[in-house]
Every structure is written in structure tokens, then in C-alpha cells.
Image: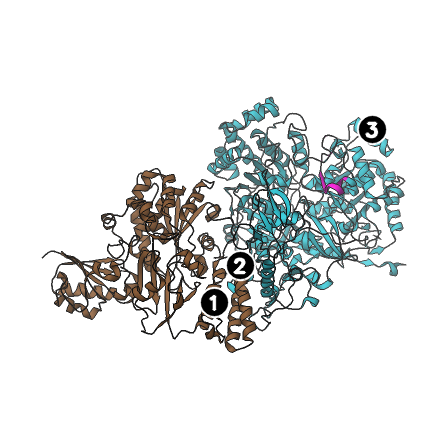
Amino acid sequence: MALVEETDLGTPARRSEEVVSLTIDGRRTRVPVGTSIMRAARLIGTEIPKLCATESLEAFGSCRMCLVEIEGRPGTPASCHTPVGEGMIVRTQTERLARLRRGVMELYISDHPLDCLTCAANGDCELQDMAGAVGLREVRYGYAGENHFADKKDESNPYFTYDPAKCIVCSRCVRACDEVQGTLALTIEGRGFGSRVSPSAHETFFDSECVSCGACVQACPTATLIEKSVIDIGQPEHSVITTCAYCGVGCTFKAEMRGDTVVRMVPYKDGNANHGHSCVKGRFAWGYTTHRERILHPMIRERIADPWREVSWEEAIGRVASEFKRLQKEHGPRAVGGITSSRCTDEETFLMQKLVRAGFGNNNVDTCARVCHSPTGYGLKTTFGTSAGTQDFDSVEHSDVMVVIGANPTDGHPVFASRMKRRLRQGAKLIVIDPRRIDLVRTPHIEAAYHLPLKPGTNVAMLTALAHVIVSEGLFNEEFVRTRCDVAAFGEWAAFVREPRNSPEAMEAVTGVPAQDVRGAAHLYATGGNAAYYYGLGITEHSQGSTAVMAIANLAMATGNIGRPGVGVNPLRGQNNVQGSCDMGSFPHELSGYRHISDAATRALFEADWRVELDSEPGLRISNMLDQALLGRFTGLYVQGEDIAQSDPDTQHVIEGLKAMECVVVQDLFLCETAHYAHVFLPGSTFLEKDGTFINAERRIQRVRKVMEPRNGMADWEVTLAIAKALGYPMHYDHPSQIMDEIARLTPTFAGVTYEKLDALGSIQWPCNENAPEGTPVMHMNGFVRGLGNFVITEYVATDERTGPRFPLLLTTGRILTQYNVGAQTRRTKNVLWHEEDRLEIHPHDADQRGIRTGDWIKLESRSGATSLRATVTDRVAPGVVYTTFHHPGTQANVVTTDYADWATSCPEYKVTAVQVSPSNGPTEWQLHYEAESAATQHIVPLAAAE
Amino acid sequence: MTRRRIFVSRDAGAIAVGADRVTAAVAEAAKRASLPIEIVRTGSRGAYWLEPLVEVETPRGRVGYGPVAPEDVPGLFACGLLDGGPHERSLGETDSIPWLKRQTRLMFSRCGITDPLSLDDYRAHAGGKGLARALALGPEDIVKEIARSGLRGRGGAGFPTGIKWRTTAEAKGTEKYVVCNADEGDSGTFADRMLMEGDPFLLIEGMSIAGIAVGATKGVIYCRSEYPNAIATMIAALKQAREAGLHGTPIADSRYDFDIELCVGAGSYVCGEETALLESVEGKRGQVRAKPPLPAHAGLYTKPTVVNNVLTFAAAAWILAEGGDAYHALGYGRSRGTMPIQLAGNVKYPGLFETPFGITLGGLIDNVGGGTASGRPVRAVQAGGPLGAYFPRALFDTPYDYEAFTERAGLIGHGGLVVFDDTVDMARQARFAMEFCAFESCGKCTPCRVGSVRGVEVIDRIVKGENRAANAALLRDLCETLKWGSLCALGGFTPYPVLSALNHFPEDFGLARKPAEV
């Protein structure tokens, strides 16, 4: 194995039909008009020296290494910013050019430390390479002149260092921050010889606006900005292309390795979702994979009050099998079930549901998507016919208007947010519908045309009011509706939304948003060109979550914003493989590809392949499992890679349910909150330790590749196989690719998917079948999957969760850039330096009334429970609304959330809870009790001692 | 007795030598003697060696006195100032002063004559004719007229203005800009300042003509912060001119919208470079952009933009008023029309001298300038600002012409000439050039950022006598790297003063004079 080499063509590609032909060093070539000479040369294998140019950034022209001679033109223009011209004759190597390049390099080196041998970038330094390329042999200026050798290093960022002594002022870092990341945190401070990179206004990297995405580090041609892990370990010797295991963007990374040690994760230029960009999580926060708290041995215990006992895999698997058999015998076949993970691979998830359906013999399988995007599946299937987003990420480059509703992309989906921001800086218009002023509302060079700060829980009212304007003012796309949609359904819907009670004026009292702004936003969406909806859990996690998804779909269809690049309905999926876990048949009523379990033909297909009879009755959802457990009817649960005790609503109810079960099996990397109530703990493997696939928010199937052996001894899919075998339902696969073959065999939307094809294409967006052998970037191009687009009436029904004298504020929740989900991974990395605790955001008005200042401990109480955390007073939230994140288990935010849920899918209503906030002295009694209890359940007796 | 009009300059150069105090003294003396006078504060006529110049309107024309000190004023009144009476400071009829009479004043025809902020005065002295004709001609014919005149950019590069305007006019885009470079930073130059302080409406008129020609709707004057008087005058003039329809939306009652605003720099020489200037106007760090794209295609806010110097717009207004042919009739070789040459440094008659191209350098220094102020022999002249070459007497036969100067490894630049006598140390001057480059470098490109600092160090070593020959060779190599490698003219032109000093005055570096290099 070797390092995956990427060719840097120096400047970005230019898209043009028009082609220019020119001659470079005697070789004729043809490239699209607008292409730089540098790129044209590199494309035919001619390397022109360069330092400030790199393919991900627009040409800058500062290093002056890439000078060339062009026949008939005076001087020596820089090839990076000189576009090709028809008939141009270029020379890249002449005596004069050699002299000039050497002269410039001599200047560079006269202010560069000569510590190449001990430099962390030794072997991976463009300055070193270029000094060699231009044949620099001496520095006649000497080293006694003015220099930066004594400049102080900035080591404030936990993941990388900035050494100004090594800086060649190419501005690649500054430009990467501007152009790629869009944070504009860096600048060049001073001028002339004093020019140096400065984060924000002469701050340290850590204290600056830097979001630690790593784009600057990646862009740096020297050791000026370099990963601390490279300084510690050394240069990698081989790399493996794989997919990030954090959010639903699904960034492709090169895992750069030294033996089986990860040296660094570098975003891969050819990654189809991220195109070479990354965020602080995927790029740097992989330290959890080797964290000392990771559990590497299977463990069992009789009662949850007992200490854990490390045992062999055989014993642990044997215990699971015997217990589940016993429970089914005692309480019936439907007394046990499983929960699949949105962090595991497609193959693992598919096996889990297969284990439940074929091994357990029931359909008691559910997944964490239940608590996030189940309304997306329901809503989009009902309207369009497919349970997934309609576009690819690249689509955003064609958008003229973006509506971001109930999503916070710069925190939740940062790499895609950078793509959005780039398009917005190019002039696309933005509408943000969110109770909170998310960063996107106003960020460098971007300001939302409209921010509609609606009251939590009023999405459907808002979306219907937008529809009212579009229909009543005749802004809908009549032709699209007539040719592509169910006209009768449209008629009914149009009559409904047109009713005066749905007007922005009438809804103003509900949403709290001025009608004028709603009308303006509706006009912009309907008439501003290609318009796309991007939404997140702020849409789905409501009692009307499914209704809101359908309301969005209605708007997209009514305005014809479906079926081409730049438009569409785009759910931003939370976890790395939440799309995949849904696709793989993780829901109790659906087999892979969203086919209902009651459908005999589908069932027959699976029964033939699996050689078992399948239960035709849908199984239990998570919430039902817990309810049944309290009734003694559900007694055994196998949870793979999910922490329902932290992530599911109404924590106390979840814990009661778990405690009521006789055998809880948890498979995870760490002793998660759910593990406190488990009887068997099966250590999990990380994404670095197994092969498989993840599916991101754009339905993109991408390969996960093993870069090291599982530290726990078995990949998660192998554990499932062992359990199945012990239960008497042996399944046999030598490699996850064979599981994918089975998925393809049994799932029409995956029919054309193979590992070979994935390796060849890099990724595939389903549907992938005979009609679309290379996948489907944009859906519903020529017709909806369900035939005609279906309009659904979206009557606004207020949630039962109401504010009142006892609970006068509305709590909504979200996440923050540096942390991920329940924080199990990111809390075990240096990302905690940015976010040590969850805080409650509260408006100054509400804070003043309660005598609360930033940093004060407050008690947050709802009718479900109470928790304590510290406050941040900010006007990002409107008066009457409070907000917190849920990354830290100590916060116990879900102690407060209620058991209200989406009417169609039971997706919990996380985003609206009536609460009271009052000053407090510290953690609540419940938090203290919980902390003591969880500490008590974490004792482990090591294997050696147990024997 | 009729009300006599007395003229004193309000030009910063005149004020610096006491014009305000002289004005106050004149007002005081007239009041004391109960003489009815009206003091008109004009621009400067550019004869700085005569400032403060006091002129009085008489039936035989304006009679000048200068330089006048406040304490001279009572005596002037005693000698019949208001009737142009004789006095030791009397210069006779101002227009007959040979230094002024010898000039061909096209751009500066009103400067020193009129009240800069009086539109009536402006119109009474042929102001506004160019714009009126431009409105009648329309965009295409304006560009043709400019092209016919042979006008070249007066900022320094000498690029044909007609081509620049045509390129911008033909560039795709509905939003276009006209930007005036008034960041006059060259040592020894002051023409832009004089014009903005002395005839601001002319600049506005020229820019409006350009706006119509290229289809721009917005104009920006980027003026250096070191020109507070010019800034105040321009702001006042822009307001008046907008009301009078010299610019605005629309211009007069035409179908052309063109509104001008003023933007003040922040003290960076390199912001006089057009792309750095655009960055600065956009509120960014004053840093040079790589070209292409040219501003004509992607300039201010990436929109097609004409960037021209103050004098170019002034000349354009004259050309539209009087015709391209009339302008083209003047000049030398490919350098057409006139140039306001600014004489400064150690020179007897410093000031602004507008004349057609073709006059020799020697003629300018010895005849117009009258040699050095110190009375010692002239040793060198730096032409074209701090990045211009030093000319020794041996090259004084060079005609004032872009091509002729280029041929002699020099440049005209913005028309500045700085004179040095025989006490100058040319090695120090060369060092100063590198130092200036280092101080003003934006830091973007490596040759300029690092090379200028190394240049100072290498010259120091030469002067100290360390490996003179090797270091002189290194200095020459460095100059080659700077000249061909730099991103903009700051680094690119620094070799002009350095190499000209080294070539023409090697003895100052402790090097032997090599005949071949002279």
C-alpha cells in the first residue's frame, strides 16, 4: 500500500463548451476557454513550478514561481492567472524563466529556517519540492538579514500549530478560509516584509473566529500550519479512502496511516459529497477510536446493580442466545426485539433487521431514525413516492433561492453549509425560517433576505401561510401542476390554502411573524428562480412533523421546484448513515427499500432468500417496546450502537422501561447511558475497523474501508453473525460485499449496486438499477416515483404542549459544530475545549425577569422533569423561547422533553417543550441521583481477575 | 469706487507658504482703509515659487504680486494695489509672466483663474462644454473622439485611454463603474491635488463623460487621505455639481445616470496601483490583484470598471469640448497632447508646467526650472516619482515622451521631476528606493515583499565594501527578479532608480565606472 496521490492542477476547472487550442512547450492541447495556462499544462503532464496556486482556490498570483513566456507578449506573465488564448504559444522552461524562478526561490529561502531534516513537513513540503525543482544551490543573501526565525508559534488549537517562522505568505490558508470554508477568520496582518497570517484581529487560532475545519492546514504548502498528530507521529506511509462517520454529509477522507496508526484524516478531493472539504469533527475528532474509555472486551452481569464481568466472546454471545431463547419461550416470540444503528454500516444494519425478522422471528426492529427523520420518510413517500431527499449536494450550485427551515447547517452540516455559503456569496438569496437567529442569517458576505423567527411548533402554520400567498396571488406553476401532479389533489389543496384563515395575516397571531415578511418570502421562493428547501430536525421533531414535510413538498410541487438541479426538497440528515439505516429496513413495518411487511409478494421474496417464514405483522416501535416492557410483555432488547437512554425523549420513562426488561444487550464503543441498564455489553468496532457502506443525505452510497483490525476483535457485522448462529439461524458472509450483494438482490432501488461499481465510481446515489445503472443524482426528473405528485392538505393543529403560567417558555433543542449527537464520540476528543457543557440560551428580557445572568446555574423544568445547566443570555433566541444542545449526558436535556410525538411516525416532539426557567444552585436531585447510579453501574471486573 | 476683485490661491501649496495669512492681511488692510474689495480664493496657477501670489483685477487684466508676505500687504496697499500699482513684488500682468506664458494650459486652463467652487465661474470659463457635447454625441462617438485624440493614461502607464474605454464599454454587464485614481503618492507630484483643489468641476465633468461613454452608473474618486483640502473641495463640488446636473441620476436631464462619490484612502502608496485601489474601495486590505482579469473586464466588485487618473479625466473633458484632433495636433511621437509636468526638489522655479510633449529634459530643468535652488550644479533628476529612473546631465537631451524615456531605461510616470544637486549620494538614493519599496510593499508577491528588504541589505554591504563586485552582481540579479517577477509596478519599477543610480553613478557605490554601462 502507498499514499493515495492526488494531482494538483493548480487552478479550478472552468466549465465551458468553447474550447481553445494552444501550444505548450511544443505540445498542442485543447482546453475549455477560461482555463489557466498552468492547468492546461498540468493536464498534459507539464508541471510548472508553483507555491501559491492550488486547485481548490482561485488563482492569486503572489508567489511568482509559475512565470512563463508567451510568444508575442511582453514580460513573463504568471501562468496561474493567465487564461489560455487561441493559438497561444507558451514556453514554460527557458533560461530566463529558470533564472527568475531561482531568484524568487533564493528570496524565499533567505527567510526560511533551514531545519528541513527535523521539520514535521519533511517529505511533504512544497517549498522543499520547488527548491529542488528550480535547482537552487546557494542563498547569496546569507541568513543574517531581517527574518522571521524568532516568531512565536501559536499552539492554541488542539489539533494544529501555526509557526509563522515557516510562513511563506502564499495566503493559501487565508483564501481557503474565505473561498472554501467561508468563515473568513484569517487575514494577512501588516504589510510588506511584516506580512503574517493573523486569525481574526490578532488573536490566537483558538480564540479567533476559526472553526477549525482544517482547510487552512490542508492548503498550507509548508509546515506553517500542520497537524499536531503529524508532528507527534511523523509522515504517513500509506492511505486508505473511506467515509466519515459523523454527520449525514458523508465526507470522503483519506485515512493517512503509519502502520495501523492513523496519522491524520485528510478530506479527499474526489469525494463526491465534500469535494475535498471537511469540518472539525471529521478532520480532527477521531481520537475517540483509541480513547482509554473504549470497551474492548465483552462483559456480562446478572443484575444491573452488579459490577460488569469481562468474559470471552463465546460466553457473551452464548449468554445473549440463551437469554433471548428463554425470554421468547417464557413470554412469547414477540417479547424480544432489536434496535439498529444509524452509525453502523448498511450491511450491519441490514443484518440486524434480518436477525430480528429471521432469527427472532418477529418484526420488533426499530432505529434511531424514529426520533429524527421518520416524518421525512413518511411525508416524501406520500407526496413524491420516495422516502428521501430529491437532490444531490452539487445541486446547490444551481440554486437561486434557498429556504433553510428548522436546520442549522453551519453547526449541523458544516461542510455542506460551506457549499451553501459559497453559492450565497455568489448572489443566491436566502430565506431562514427558524425560531433562533442561526449563524447563516448573518455571516460574512451573507445576509438572509428574510429571517422568519416563528414560534416553535408553528411550522405547518407558516408553510401553509406561504402556500396561501403563492396560490392566492397566482404565483404557482400551473403547467408543472397540470403535467406532473394530481390535478384533483392540487385543486383541493389550493382551495384549502386559499382560505382566509390560512393567510399570513391570520396566521400572524400563531407564528408571531409579521405577515409582510411572510408574503415577501413567498414571493421570493415562487419567483426567484431555482428555489430549494433545506430542512432538518426542526421540521420533523414535532407533533406535526410529517405534516410539515408534506407542506414543504406541496410548496415545491406548486412552484415547479422539483426535478432539476438547483431545486427540490432536501432533508439534511443527522447521522452518517441514518438514510442507510432507513433504506435497509430498520422500521418495524418495512423491509429494505421501504416495502411494507404486510405485502405478501415482497415477503415471499425475502422468505425464499432467507429460507424462513416472516411475520406479516409490523413489530413494535421503540416507544412501544418501552411501554410493553413496563407491562412485562417485552423483556429482551438488543441495542446496536444507539444510546436511547440519552437520545430518546422523556429519559425517566426510557430508564423505567429498560429497568423492567430482563435482558438488555448493548453493543457500543463505550459504556453509554443505555449500558447502565444492560446485562450484556458487546464491544463495538469503529468505522476505521470495518468494511461496509454508509448512505448520506443525498442518497449517496459510499464505501467505508477498514484501515485497522477491530481493536475489540470483531467488526459489528461479525458479532451479529455470531448471535444469529448461536440462536440457530446461521448466516454466512465472508465479506460485507456479499451482504451488499444480498441487499441488491432483494431491493429494487439497490439492484445495480456492487462494491466493484462503488470502487469504480466512487459513490452511487440510489435508485441504482437497470434504468439508472450509475445511480440517480436528482430524482423525479421526468415524473414522480409515485406517478403524479400528490398534494396533501396540511391543516395546522397546535401541539398539545402549551405554555401556561407554570411553564411559560418554549424550549427547543439543537446542536453545535464541535459536538456530535449525544457526544459519545466528540466528548472523548479535544473538541470539548470548544464546548465543555450544554448551555441554555435565553433572551435578555426573559433572563432579566428571572434575575439570570450569563454563566448562572438555572433550573429547567417541564411537566416531565427538571434538570440544571448554566445559562447564556443572548438575543439569538426570541423572547419566550429558550434553546439548548443535548451533547452532554450530565445535562439530561431529555429529562425535560415530553412524550408528545409526530402523529404519523411517533417521532418525538423534541423541538417544543413548555418549560420554566429559574435560578438554581447547581445540578438537580435527579442529576445527582443519576450520576451516582451511573457511576455505580460502571464497575468492571477485568477478565484476568474474574478467572 | 467700484468693488475690486482680489485673487489669492486657496491651494494647499499656497496656504503652506502663507496664503491664508496674506488673505487675512489683505482683508484687514482693505477694511481699515474702507476700500470695497472682494477676495476670490482661486486655485493655484502652479508657479509655486511665486506663492503666495496676490492678483488684482484691473482694466488691463490681472496684475500679480508675489511672493507676498503678510507684512508686505500694507505696503502693497500704499502702492496702489487695487489699481495694479508698482511695487517691488509686482510681477506685472500675470498672464505675461514668461513662466506662465510659455505654457499650453488645457487641463489647467481655469486653475488659478476661477473660484473652484463657483459653477458660474466654471461655466463662464468654458466649463461644461465637454459634457454638453458628450451628451449630444452618445457613448460610441465619445469613445471615438477620445481614441482620435491619442490620449494616454496620465497615471503613469500611458495606456491608450480610448482602448480602455472601448474595452469597458464592450464588456458584458449592466453594472459598471468609473473610478478616478486620485491617490497621488509619487514624490514631487501635485498635479492631481492642484486640479482637485483648483478646478474640481473639470474632474467631475471628465468622469461623467467617461460614465456615459462606457455605460457606468457609478463613479468613485479615490483620494489619498493626505489631501484634506482636496477632499473638502471635492466633496463640496460633488454636492453642487449633483444639484447642477454635472453628475447625478440622471446627468442634467439626459437619459444617463451617473453619480460620483468620494472615497478616502488610508495611507498606502500601493493603493495608487489600480487593482489595490479597487480592493481598498471595496473595504479590503490594500493589496494588488493579479491581472488578468483587467479592471475593464472585472474591476470594482468584479464589474467592468474604468480606472483613470485625475489628469486623464481632465484631458478627456477638454478633448470633448475642443475635439480630439485639436488635442492630437499637440505633442511628440506617440505622446499626444500636453502634460502638466511637476518640477520639485532642489529647483529654482518649482511648480506645475503644462506643456505639449517633446520638450527636452534639459530644457525643463535648466530653462523652466532655472537649475537648482541651491545654485550648485544639477547632478541628477529623478523622473516619474520614487520608482522613476535617475537621469544624469548626459541624458538631458531626452525629449519628454513616453517612448523616449523608456528607451533610456526611465519613465515619465505621473509627470514628476525631482532635481538633485551635486551633493547627492546616489548610493543612498538607491538604498532609499529599496527602502521605499520595502516600506510600501503590500506584501503579496515575494520579489517585492522579501526582495526589497534584501535590496537594502545588499546595498548596505556594497557601501560598506563587503565583496563589492559579488554584491553588485547580486543586486543586478535581484533587480531582474524584481522587474520581471513582481506582481505590480511597485516591485517592478524599483529597479529603475536602483539600476540608474548604479549605472550612471557607480562611483557613489565605490565601484569603478564602466564606460559600457553608461
Q: Is residue A47 visible?
A: yes
User: Which quarter of the rendered picture does the C terminus of chain A lie within?
Assistant: bottom right
Q: Residue B498: which numbered mark, if any?
A: 1
- Which residue is identified by label 3? A604
Report the front residue among A7 and A436: A7
Q: Chain of mark 2?
A: B
Residue A29 drawn at (x, y percent): 63, 44
Question: Label 3 to label 2, Cα distance in Å?
Answer: 77 Å
State yes or no: residue A827 in magenta.
no
Specify start and end residues of the magenta stretch as a single range.
Answer: A757-771
Report the front residue among A585 and B442: B442
SS of the residue under disc 3:
helix
What chain is colored brown? B
* Horizontal arrangement in the rendering, residue A524 relative to residue A904 (left or right): left
* Horizontal arrangement in the rendering, residue A711 relative to residue A557 (left or right): right
SS of the residue under disc 2:
helix
Report the front residue among B369 and A617: B369
Type of residue at label 3? Ala
Q: Chain of mark 1?
A: B
- Which residue is identified by label 2? B484
